[in-house]
Image (tube, rainbow, N blue to C red):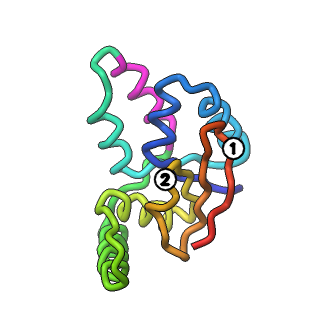
Amino acid sequence: MPAYLLDTGILIRHLRNQPNYHELVRRLNQTGDLYISAFTRVEVLRGMREHERERTVALLDGFITQVIDQATADQAGEWIRAWQGRGITLGGPDAVIAASAFYANAALVTTNARHFPMPELTVLSADENGQLSAVTG
């Protein structure tokens, strides 16, 4: 069964009731296991509104949370360093999310594919209609 790690942007659009993203998450859930990075959980909880707490936590609890362990942290740091050497700045959160997908053996589903240039990853870019396309690094 395939696995998908959902980036923060996907969850925010889902929580903001964008129907195309509700459908996207539903489709992915029917075909594979859905993961989020522990860092994505932090980002979503940080940005939620108080009246959204119950719904937001229920949504997050429905995903498998990929923990940030030593291997994940090390891989994120290696990618940041390696890409910096090529003149490309990777954000720490994005590198952690990418490493989470890598260690979950999951395709990374995102609205910001340019943040994830790592050729080791399978990146699926979601457009405004919730349609996915594969991105090559």
Q: Which residue is mark 1?
A: 131
Is residue 87 or residue 29 the one in the foreground? 87
Pinpoint residue 76: horizontal percent, then vertical percent: 34, 70
Label 2 or label 1, whichever comes before in sequence order = 2
What residue appears at the point 30 percent right and 43 percent down from the top-left corner? 42
In the image, residue 124 sits, relative to residue 16, either above or below, namely: below
- Range covered by the magenta-colored residues: 52-63
Residue lying at the far front of the rendered structure: 87
Pinpoint residue 19: horizontal percent, then vertical percent: 62, 25
Query: The residue under label 2 is which amino acid type?
Result: Asn
Query: The residue under label 1 is which amino acid type?
Result: Gln
What residue appears at the point 44 percent right and 34 percent down from the top-left corner? 12
In the image, residue 21 sits, relative to residue 16, either above or below, namely: below
User: If the image is split into quadrants, where does the N terminus sit?
Assistant: bottom right
Q: Which residue is mark 2?
A: 112
Helix, strand or loop for disc 2: loop
Q: Is residue 57 found inside the magenta-colored segment of the image?
A: yes
